Amino acid sequence: MAYKSLRSILTVALVALAVAWAAPSQAKEKVSIAGLTWPGYGFWFIAQEKGLAPDLEISYQAIEDPYQSFGLATSGQLDVVSSTIEFAPIAAAQGMPISLVAYGNLSYGTDKIVVGPGIESAQDLIGKKVAVLEGGLAQLYMAIWLEQNGVAYDKVEYVNLIMDDAASAMIGGDVAAAEFWDPFGTQILTNLPGSRLAAQSREPFWLSNALIADSVFMNSDFIAKRRDVAVKTMQALYDAIAWWRKNPTEGNKIIADGMKMSVADVELVIGKDGTGKDGGLYPYGFMEAARFCGSAPGDPPFGQKNSQITDHWKMTNDWWIKFGQMDKTVAPEAGIDCSLLSDLHKAGYAQ
């Protein structure tokens, strides 16, 4: 009887010890990510659902105010922010501990400038109201388009409206033009008689200058103190994009479920066939993003050039000075960190 009790005690002790030894290897590194409810950011759900990063516990939180996301990342409550790219120079100028680590999705038609009834050219907009999200890519898109068409960027009145409100203002005749992303732009063109598509991001000029895009930001401490996790996080993203390209139907369903939106809206934005060219947004794979960042040799697609991320930074920095969002030029190296992509490339990762 005593022998059996001793054996039981030893067995329990050995099991407990084995569990203790195994626990560290089984523990997953937590990675907290936030961004808009937007199909282009849904690849994080694929990485999670398909176990593409088995040693990471990836969580994605939908936060509709990018400034809130950046505030949480600044305080260390978020590791990663998926957001549009134009905030990078502003963050650096304000000394925020956030780095732009990768160019993400290129707008491939989802962004549109729509003019209302009676507007035949950009000249007709002089002195009129146009709806944009001030301080965002929509405002830069509108300003550059105006100047392309012979109208100084400050000859219109910018009205700061979110998409729902901009659509209502357009239909109600309160604004003469607006910058929309889908599904809003397509809805206006379908439902507002006399409205017209004046520009869309699939045009060669917009594809080559790469202005309108999503990107990946990371907390600087996350990179410095958990670098291996940061590298694995980026690999998980690119593995998810590669998986989606081969399995677009299932991938779009995962994104739709994660983002709590319809599959039809997901397909409208990122397409159905996995090419990225049958929707309105082109997701950059690893080598495309690495080339844009200058972390791998060769040129990105669409007539872009190697290391174009620095030109993009300078372009947005100059425009923010014009609009009064910034008062000085900030060097790209103050807020761009392409070293994670460089690490992946040096390690032989090519998706």
Image (spheres, helix red, strand yellow):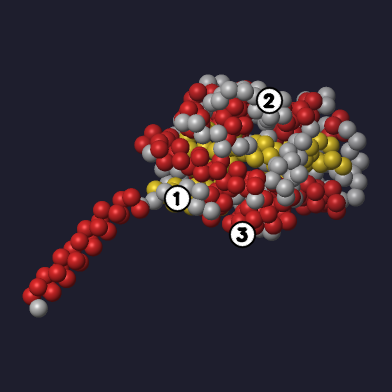
Residue type beneath disc 3:
Asp
Q: Which residue is mark 2?
A: 304
**Amino acid type, mark 1:** Pro
Q: Residues within 10 Å of mark 3 (few under 14, many from 20)?
A: some
What secondary structure is found at the residue carrying circle 3?
A: helix
Mark 3 = which residue?
257
Q: Which mark sits nearer the N-terminus, 2 or 1?
A: 1
Image spot of residue 336 (x, y percent): 52, 28
Q: CA distance from mark 2 to mark 1?
A: 34 Å
Query: Type of residue at label 2?
Result: Gln
Alpha carbon of mark 2 to alpha carbon of mark 3: how far? 34 Å
Labels 2, 1: front one: 1
Which residue corresponds to the image point at 62% horizontal and 23% vertical from the top-left?
Answer: 298
The N terminus, quarter of image: bottom left
Q: CA distance from mark 3 to mark 1?
A: 21 Å
* Image: 199 above or below 246: above
Q: Secondary structure at mark 2?
A: loop
Q: Is 276 positioned to the left or the right of 17 in the image? A: right
Please name which of the two marks, 3 or 1, marks the residue nearer to the observer: 1
Quick one: 126 or 34, which is closer to the camera? Answer: 34
Residue shown at 68% from the left, 39% from the top: 282
Q: Which residue is mark 1?
A: 54
